[in-house]
Amino acid sequence: MNTTPQPDPKDRPARLTVGVVGAGRVGPVLAAALQLAGHRPVAVSGVSDASRRRAADLLPDVPLMTPAEVLQRAELVLLTVPDDALPGLVTGLAETGAVRPGQLIAHTSGRYGAKVLDPALRAGALPLALHPAMTFTGTAVDVQRLAGCSFGVTAPEELRLAAEALVIEMGGEPEWIAEDRRPLYHAALALGANHLVTLVAQSLELLRTAGVGAPDRMLGPLLGAALDNALRSGDAALTGPVARGDAGTVAAHIVELRAHAPQAVAGYVAMARATADRALDHGLLRPELAEDLLGVLADGNGGTERTDGTDGTEGDAR
């Protein structure tokens, strides 16, 4: 058994002082993960009471400061603000002289690559885009969830190794995303994760309305299996009345949704049509069954046109 004492992470060379601008759910978590790797959080900015409490919980004894003061103290600055606020923040910090030459400036936006940091780059900073592909609670549990989490990484080629090293130190797995593909990359994640939450919440509400006492217990195994199957098999994992072409069942669903949850009808129809398209493309749904099914969906959505431009009354199943 090896009894050699392991070195303290704080004693590792090239440790960075870390600052966080925007103490939302992401920034303090990433700073806490970097602290475990031996880096030293030195300053954090936050405006709301919730962000201040979050910073205090995850980064105790790290002082709250203004964004300009955070940049003054830190060698690595994490800009963890909402996407729409990021360009203005970067421009403002650069114009006021807060950015220092040689300073690492990393943002966590999924939408933007490194180009949004150009004002900081012109001031001599080193720009990094490090987006964790994970939903955050803003609590200590997120630090553990970073283990194996993919990060969408974009940076100048000469900073690629530095960006990837920081991700690995946080426990993540770097995935290189080209600058011009960032919006598509982010759209893909939002489509899967954000819409999943909406779909699950709607399903829980409908099950409660149907009289199910523990809808979470009912959905848990079903959704877990569906997710696992989808990740393993893609479209081949499609099941249910749409993939089978059960137009009568789908029509009954729409009737019930109109009666009990009319706000869910449009989403149900849109997802059913997308499912039908994919099932057709992969040979899971027979064209002769798809005709009636797509007719029901067209009626359920107020007779709107199909995605292929047909009106739902002709024989074309697509």
Image (cartoon, grey):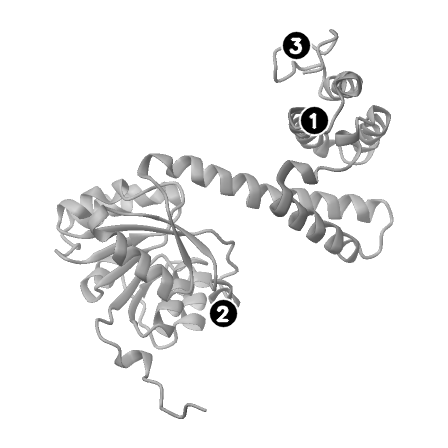
Q: Percent x, y for residue 148?
A: 48, 61
The residue wearing badge 2 is 140
Q: Percent x, y for residue 229?
A: 67, 47
Residue placed most toward the observer, 296 or 23: 296
Query: Which mark identifies residue 157?
Result: none
Marks 1 and 3: in contact by CB < 8 Å?
Answer: no
Give the residue type at disc 3.
Answer: Thr
Horizontally, is 10 left or right of 140 in the view?
Answer: left
Residue at left offset 41%, top offset 90%:
2
Q: Percent x, y for residue 45?
A: 32, 61
The first of marks 2 and 1 along the sequence is 2
Q: How many marks?
A: 3
The residue wearing badge 1 is 283
CA gap, disc 2 and disc 3: 52 Å
The first of marks 2 and 3 along the sequence is 2
Query: Which mark identifies residue 310?
Result: 3
Q: Is residue 8 above or below residue 287?
A: below
Horizontally, is 185 left or right of 122 in the view?
Answer: right
Q: Is residue 197 above or below residue 286?
A: below
Give the residue type at disc 2.
Answer: Ala
Horizontally, is 3 left or right of 268 in the view?
Answer: left
